[in-house]
Amino acid sequence: MIKGLVFDPSSFFSVLQCEIDDDWFEHYEIPTALHSVKRIPCGDLVFFLDIALNDETKPIIVIDLTEPYPIFRKDRVDRYVLDRLSTVGRAILTNSVSIPFNWHSHGQGSLQSVYAANKNIGGGSRIHFDSNPAGNKDLLFFSRVDAPIEFSKLHTADDVYLSARSLLNEAIKSPPPRRINPANVTGINLSRRLPESFSRGATLDQWYETKLTEEQREFVDKSYDGPVRLRGAAGTGKTLSLAVKFVRDALAFHRNSTSRRLCFLTHSSGTVDQVTGICLELDSRGILTGQSKHVITHIRTLYDLAYDYLKFDLDDLTPLSLDGRDGRKMQAELISGILIEMRSDVTLARFRDISDNLQASWAAQKSSDAHQRLVLELMNEFASILDADGIWAGTEKGEKYAKGQIGYRAVWLMSLPTERDRRFVLEIHRRYRSLLTEMNTLSVDQMVADFNSFLDSNTWDRLKSTKGFDAIFVDELHLFTSIERQVLHKLIRNTIGGDGITTRPPIFMAYDVKQSPRDTFTYVGEGDGTLFSASTQLQKSELVKLSKVFRYTPQIAEFLYDLDATFPAIDLAGEWEKFAITAEVADGDIPSLSIFKDEAELLRRVFDTAHDQARRLGGKRVAILCVNDQLFDHYDNISRKRYEGRIIHVNSREPNLDLRHAGKKVIFSMPEYVAGLQFEVVHLLHVDAQDYPKELSIGEQRRVISSIYLGSSRAERGLHLHCCESRGGHASLLNLGIKRGSLTVERLID
Ligand SMILES: Nc1ncnc2c1ncn2[C@@H]1O[C@H](COP(=O)(O)OP(=O)(O)OP(=O)(O)O)[C@@H](O)[C@H]1O
């Protein structure tokens, strides 16, 4: 019986980076193709060591498998536990990530425990680890228990740990075993975690020397003397270029023994996963896993960083992600409730003179479209303007906002022409904030606002030299709110050059403003709606534009071109550009539009078809994305029952490890939650006429088209749009594509 697994950090990360199935937990074999790792059974233990390892003072990671509480139990939770071990390992050994707050970490001295998996999978079970076993800088995982347990009652795995330490030297000296037949190895697949199309098996040098386009290379070669923007339509290789630059620069600093701290920030944990996968594959020296003395790299979300530095006391507070579908549903309920409550008290009289349009929407029935649209507009105004800029009733900024003195307000934002209108919005916002306070809830936007103040504090001034970064890489900048963009330059630690002059921050950022389903890229204030206010220190940064697309077929590009023409023209100081790209991918089918009789028919046919496709194409390759909030919730509920176990539901940008274990399942989500990801086939649901009435404002139009553009551009080869006759047939914004033949129509009414 195997009592424990022992790794050195490099082999730990190499093995855990592979796609691992349930079978692996039978024998813990590794495939021969994992050249750098040797597997040595020694006593009751199995060692996984880097073949180059020759120093027994290096840290080790030990996983205890002894009864009664082994870490792995050969059940369906094992794979999820393994993912958590990987994150804990990175947090403890490389400090490049932090343990997510929803894992509810508890600690006492060097002992800590976290949930073993998310609630659905792991119930309340927890795993424990010791980051200083027997006083050494090693990491010992032990005791997976079904419910929280007092640390004093824990069965610690000292004997397994001590025997791992004493056998280490013998294992290091053992020659790698004879090659085993690869067919005997089950349960482990190299590099499958990454969608194949991402890596295409190329090394860093191959990417740089032969594959990158001239434009991409120009970006990768940029020096660190100021901010640089990388702009390009969906699928032009922005993420990839950032990743290549990140790893290439890290390697160069390492080779020159230059001490550097580099940070890659993304908007969602899903993309952190993806970017980590790409970077690990490009990183031949293990710099990302803490093997360099000189270069430290972090790949994180901004929230993760904020949480790490601020160390909120989460026992008293529930962090609420207003970006997750649940959070947004709750927010919509709260705002809707406030609007109704305000009609029944003195507020009605106070705001009787607001603009007619606003008055009419406020007076509309709760179930009406007008009411729902007002709620959505208010949510957008809160997220993009009020919370994002710290504008609150009763403050100086709030007064300026009310009086319209904040200066420029982009036309695509909610129309609030009079002071009464703006005071009305401030009042709803005030009530909304006090409801959140009563509920002891902290929104993600509030957390970032606190983080922004923290970065202005004296504490940060002192911490900056050790905790700050030398350069920041930002992906999906268009999803960052204005306050998040202001935070970026404050994270840079060294802002004074050798000659005593303030230097410009080396921040490398990629974006495509058309992919923002909310107006987060907006800010009110000076200028004409550029992406950067003066306080970001990112104005007038250098620009590299990408013009070739590598994700999707020329046919999908053609459809996106027609869709792009329907965007209302908005002025964004040159950032809003016509979609003009060439596709570098082989031909495929023309995207299709299917029109069903009603929702029931659509749901049944699309889910069945997608399910068949996923079975044929395999893991993570097929996604159903719904552009309508309400119908998404509705289908989400139905499909959880009807297609139980066959669908991965992604309804927030929070970590979703399920995505890694997609197997042959279909992904069901909304476009904004899969921003940055890609699938072979995408089904886009409900591009219905009913949701795109003529009276939509410019802002509303822009947001819905962005959502369709974002969803459609996730597809690599197959794109299928769906709508239903009972909701008015297809939206008119598809007419251009239909007329020009970039979208073929199939009528499926029985
Ligand atoms: N020069 C290139 N040669 C071949 N493939 C490439 C090249 N550049 C990018 N790709 C591939 O194109 C796909 C899309 O790249 P990536 O996700 O980086 O685009 P993006 O611009 O970040 O897209 P989005 O804005 O939609 O997130 C990936 O599969 C990537 O591997």
Image (spheres, rainbow, N blue to C red):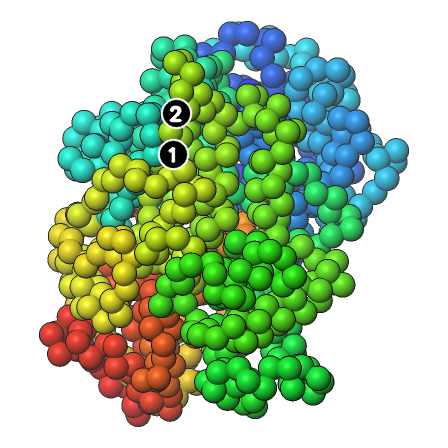
Residue at coordinates 25% horizontally, 81% vertically from top-left? 732
Residue 410, placed above or below residue 220: below
Q: Is mark 2 within 8 Å of ligand 1?
A: no
Residue 385, placed above or below residue 191: below
Horizontal arrangement in the rendering, residue 658 relative to residue 671 (left or right): right
Nearer mark to the viewer, of 1 and 2: 2
The answer to whether one can see residue 37 in this image is: no
The location of residue 237, given as percent across then percent down, is 26, 44
Q: What element does badge 1 sit on? A: strand
Residue at coordinates 33% horizontally, 25% vertically from top-left? 225
The location of residue 276, given as percent across then percent down, is 43, 37
Residue at coordinates 22% horizontally, 37% vertically from top-left? 216
The location of residue 556, given as percent across then percent down, is 20, 62
Instruction: Name the residue beneath numbered marker 2.
Output: 503
Judge by depth and name the residue closer to the eye, 426 or 350: 350
Name the quadrant of the C terminus: bottom left
The part of the image, by quadrant, that contains residue 691 is bottom left
The answer to whether one can see residue 653 in this image is: yes
The part of the image, by quadrant, that contains residue 414 is bottom left
Please name the amino acid that badge 1 sits on: Ile
Please name the amino acid that badge 2 sits on: Thr
Residue 30, placed above or below residue 633: above
Q: What element does badge 2 sit on? A: loop
Horizontal arrangement in the rendering, residue 101 relative to residue 315 (left or right): left
Q: Residues within 10 Å of mark 2 (few under 14, many from 20)?
A: some
Instruction: Name the residue beneath numbered marker 1.
Output: 507
